[in-house]
Image: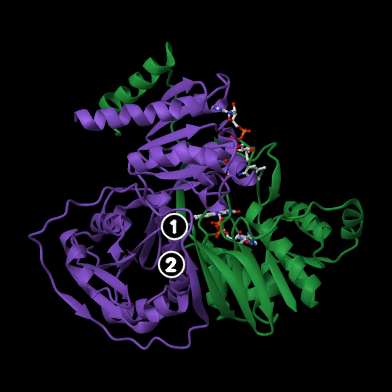
């Protein structure tokens, strides 16, 4: 059966997030040729509609309102439900981001529906789709199918290949007005910390430091390497507990779970809780002065030695490579 | 203040996971309170100590979850409720779990409900926000700070590294993020006292639910382990040469830079 799917396009700092394009690709897979409708919610987002279409949406509905400048679950929930009522979709796809994690369960509760969170892969197509998602923070995976009600799922960033952008595609971007009122939560202030660059959950490269970096200043060379590779920095809990960095950088079973193309672990021993958060990365590099460190068991490439010698050498080497390229 | 903390019993984070008969093998495993729920319990106790009232910890599970409830009581919670579904349910999805919790809480007039941001086993992060929606109360997820003043709370929410300060109306459900507090260890006197604190055990009947109300919408068809990551190559030789080789390998063999 063909399904009409609505996909939430998520905007951060005025731009669409990659995960929204990945969500469109996932939507196509289960739609059975049905229409893909992109949804944009914010105070000024309609202009981004064409980009969603270039990535595979057939048309876009935008809800704009001054109360939607910041995400609140009431505000975005009201806006989303207005679109839902208009479109009556058979399927819904969000990114599994801070916003998607907060909003999707509330929408699912409103719709009394099931919801499959944090999907990393979809097997089969259309009505036969089976969703794969990590459990035990990636120590295992489960396959689930949806028995009843709308097909509603969130996709983990960086796992599903987006469709190629097609600048020739065009479609209708319409606006829908909605009453956004009685917000029970109001955002008073936003402090941007940790990342002034790439967000960890969407980064292709992560350079992570552990207790071996020995202090907040020990993260500096890691940050330089990450910047050079267009990546983000991350950390073990050891580094966070020692106050070398903020908890928002923690990777592992009680931190973020990440799957970048390249994960460089420097001065991290490789405790089971840390491995749960990163061992599904595509390529892992370990730098540790202890040849027995557990991290080498999951590393594709390892160097035994002092990170304070090795990281600067890597930076020089990569700079050389870039000059020669 | 009438405070509830939702706790889930889960595998110790030290445990390796193995699959048996299409499910996760539990034999011999150690169990703990879901780490995020420890933050929730700790915060509940602190709020009570500051504003007065009572903390009830609530779990859905089997009799075995009594142990985790006793731990929460030993930390300082006042009462515990176990909704035992062992005899009634073979399957339970997030919709079902939230339905049970919301049905129980429906007539309890909670001022504040604290949950974990995510359970480190199921990992959906759905139960907290679903419960809030079903109860029709306000909800803020992944918080790292909570201050309550009358019918208004000021919370700091972690949004992928950014911090948002939010004013939120009570009654409120929050989900705890790491950094909210340092959960205390139960003290010896705490453990002794916990043995005498009330622990109520209920079944679905007692909260007017039937198996049919909880029929799963999402069905698990398989569980599997990721392919074991093979140890790769530890490079050798002069350090400078190793670094050169590594960068070459990343470019030409792994094609990631
Ligand atoms: C409930 C629970 C949840 C947890 N959740 C997480 C989680 O989500 N994420 C997480 O990471 N941990 C988690 N942990 C903690 C985990 O068990 C480890 O304690 C932690 O990962 C260790 O951090 P580390 O590797 O940085 O430190 P250590 O284990 O101290 O390792 C430091 C490493 O640095 C190396 N080193 C030192 N100096 C240098 C140098 N100059 N050059 C190169 N190498 C050097 C050392 O050889 C050592 O291997 C959790 C623990 C518990 C109990
Ligand atoms: C198809 C399917 C079948 C399943 N069958 C079973 C089964 O037979 N038996 C089984 O035990 N599990 C089963 N599960 C898992 C069960 O559905 C989940 O554990 C439950 O829905 C909670 O989801 P979660 O673990 O993702 O928790 P999350 O939503 O990530 O949890 C967030 C927070 O909600 C609260 N919370 C979550 N669960 C509970 C709880 N049980 N009690 C109190 N508070 C809680 C905690 O504060 C927790 O930190 C099944 C899941 C699926 C999808």
Residue B106 rendering spot, x and y as whole percentages: 64, 79
Q: Nearer the viewer, residue A273 or B164?
A: B164
Task: Name the tint of chain B in the rendering.
Answer: green
Badge number at residue A239: none
Return the residue at label 1.
A117
Displayed-image quarter of ligand 2:
bottom right
Looking at the image, residue A293 lies above or below residue B98? above
Give residue A67's quadrant in the image. Answer: bottom left
- Chain at numbered mark 1: A
For disc 1, the neighbor class at 10 Å (few under 14, some 14 to 19, many from 20) is many
Ligand 2 within 8 Å of the CB at mark 1: yes
Quadrant position of the C terminus of chain A in the picture? top left
- What's the CA distance linking mark 2 and mark 1? 9 Å
> Is label 2 in a helix, a strand or a loop?
helix
Residue A91 rendering spot, x and y as whole percentages: 31, 66
Q: In the visual, does A133 lie left or right of B186? A: left
Contact between labelled residues 1 and 2, with CB atoms less than 8 Å apart: yes
Do the residues indicated by labels 2 and 1 lie within the same chain of the protein? yes
Badge number at residue A104: 2
Answer yes or no: is residue A129 visible. yes
For disc 2, the neighbor class at 10 Å (few under 14, some 14 to 19, many from 20) is many
Please give the name of the residue rendered at 42% of the width and 36% of the height, measured from the top-left corner: A263
Quadrant position of the N terminus of chain A in the picture? bottom left
- Chain at numbered mark 2: A
Residue B75 rendering spot, x and y as whole percentages: 80, 58
Q: Residue furthest left?
A: A168
Q: In the visual, does B79 lie left or right of A12? A: right
Q: Nearer the viewer, residue A186 or A177?
A: A186
> Is label 1 in a helix, a strand or a loop?
strand
Rendered purple, the chain in question is A
Please give the name of the residue rendered at 66% of the width and 58% of the height, measured from the top-left corner: B37
């Amino acid at each position: 059966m063909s399904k009409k799917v609505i996909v939430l396009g998520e905007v951060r700092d005025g731009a669409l997030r990659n995960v929204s394009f990945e969500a469109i690709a996932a939507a196509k897979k289960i739609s059975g040729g049905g229409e893909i409708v992109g949804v944009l919610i914010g105070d000024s987002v309609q202009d981004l509609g064409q980009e969603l279409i270039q990535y595979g949406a057939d048309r876009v509905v935008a809800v704009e309102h001054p109360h939607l400048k910041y995400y609140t679950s009431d505000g975005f929930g009201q806006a989303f439900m207005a679109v839902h009522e208009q479109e009556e979709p058979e399927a819904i796809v969000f990114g599994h981001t801070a916003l998607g994690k907060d909003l999707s369960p509330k929408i699912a509760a409103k719709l009394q529906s099931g919801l499959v969170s944090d999907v990393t892969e979809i097997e089969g197509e259309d009505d036969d789709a089976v969703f794969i998602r990590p459990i035990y923070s990636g120590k295992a995976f489960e396959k689930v199918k949806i028995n009843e009600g709308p097909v509603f799922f969130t996709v983990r960033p960086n796992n599903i290949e987006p469709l190629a952008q097609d600048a020739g595609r065009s479609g209708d971007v319409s606006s829908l007005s909605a009453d956004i009122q009685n917000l029970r939560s109001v955002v008073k202030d936003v402090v941007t910390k940790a990342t002034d660059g790439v967000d960890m959950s969407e980064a292709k490269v992560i350079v992570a430091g552990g207790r071996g970096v020995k202090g907040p200043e020990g993260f500096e060379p890691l940050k330089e390497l990450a910047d050079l590779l267009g990546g983000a920095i991350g950390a073990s809990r050891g580094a966070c507990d020692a106050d070398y960095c903020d908890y928002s950088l923690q990777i592992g079973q009680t931190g973020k779970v990440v799957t970048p193309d390249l994960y460089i672990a420097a001065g991290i021993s490789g405790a089971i809780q840390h491995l749960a958060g990163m061992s599904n990365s595509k390529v892992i590099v370990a730098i540790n002065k202890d040849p027995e460190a557990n991290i080498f068991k999951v590393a594709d490439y390892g160097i035994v030695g002092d990170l304070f010698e090795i990281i600067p050498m890597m930076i020089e080497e990569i700079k050389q490579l870039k000059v020669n390229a | 203040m009438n405070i509830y903390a939702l706790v889930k019993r889960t595998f110790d984070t030290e445990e390796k996971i193995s699959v048996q008969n299409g499910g996760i093998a539990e034999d011999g495993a150690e169990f703990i309170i879901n780490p995020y729920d420890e933050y929730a319990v700790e915060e509940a106790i602190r709020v009570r100590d500051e504003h007065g009232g009572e903390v009830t910890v609530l779990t859905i599970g089997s009799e075995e979850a009594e142990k985790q409830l006793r731990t929460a009581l030993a930390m300082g919670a006042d009462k515990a409720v176990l909704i035992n579904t062992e005899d009634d349910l073979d399957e339970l999805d997030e919709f079902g779990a939230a339905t049970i919790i919301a049905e129980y809480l429906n007539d309890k007039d909670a001022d504040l409900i604290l949950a974990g941001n995510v359970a480190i086993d199921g990992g959906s992060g759905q139960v907290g926000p679903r419960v809030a929606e079903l109860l029709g109360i306000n909800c803020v997820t992944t918080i790292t700070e909570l201050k309550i003043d009358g019918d208004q709370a000021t919370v700091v929410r972690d949004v992928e590294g950014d911090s948002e300060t939010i004013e939120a109306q009570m009654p409120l459900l929050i989900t705890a993020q790491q950094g909210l507090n340092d959960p205390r260890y139960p003290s010896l006197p705490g453990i002794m006292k916990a043995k005498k604190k009330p622990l109520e055990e209920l079944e679905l009947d007692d909260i007017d639910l039937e198996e049919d109300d909880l029929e799963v919408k999402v069905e698990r068809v398989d569980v599997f382990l990721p392919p074991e990551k093979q140890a790769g190559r530890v490079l050798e030789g002069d350090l400078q040469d190793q670094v050169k080789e590594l960068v070459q390998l990343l470019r030409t063999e792994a094609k990631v830079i």
